[in-house]
């Protein structure tokens, strides 16, 4: 995954575009992984995807989205 944050600006529109692009990439990867694995259930030893999120970044991006919707 591309972790180069130096190209990101503080512009909410640009941040939102970057987030949508990242979300699309994640969805494509998820679909690929499911097609390869045959959509097998999660092992008890594995953590759910929700536990891998970065809450600070997620909350920041959600705040940007909410401000944009509120305008």
Image (cartoon, rainbow, N blue to C red):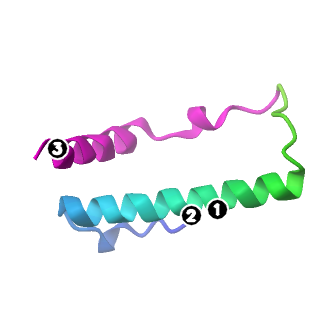
Is 3 placed left or right of 63 in the picture? right
- Residue 21: horizontal and vertical position, in percent? 45, 65
Q: Is residue 25 magenta?
A: no
| Residue density around tag 2, few if under 14, some if 14–19, many if 20 or more, within 10 Å | few
**Tag 1's secondary structure?**
helix
Residue at horizontal 46%, vertical 41%?
54
The percent position of residue 38, horizontal first and vertical second, equals 89, 49
Pointer 2 with pointer 3, Cβ within 8 A: no
Residue bearing the label numbered 2: 25
The residue carrying pointer 3 sits among few (fewer than 14), some (14 to 19) or many (20 or more) residues within 10 Å by Cα, namely few
Mark 2 to mark 1 CA distance (whole Å): 5 Å
For image coordinates 42% across by 70% down, the residue present is: 4
Residue at 24% across, 40% down: 63
In the picture of the structure, the residue carrying the numbered disc 3 is: 67
Where is 56 relative to 33, above or below?
above
Start and end of the magenta stretch? 45-71
């Amino acid at each position: 995954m591309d972790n180069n944050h130096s190209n990101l600006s503080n512009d909410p529109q640009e941040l939102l575009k970057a987030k949508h692009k990242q979300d699309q990439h994640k969805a494509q990867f998820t679909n690929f992984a499911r097609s390869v694995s045959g959509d097998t259930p999660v092992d008890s030893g594995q953590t759910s995807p929700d536990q891998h999120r970065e809450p600070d970044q997620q909350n920041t991006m959600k705040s940007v989205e909410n401000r944009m919707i509120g305008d």
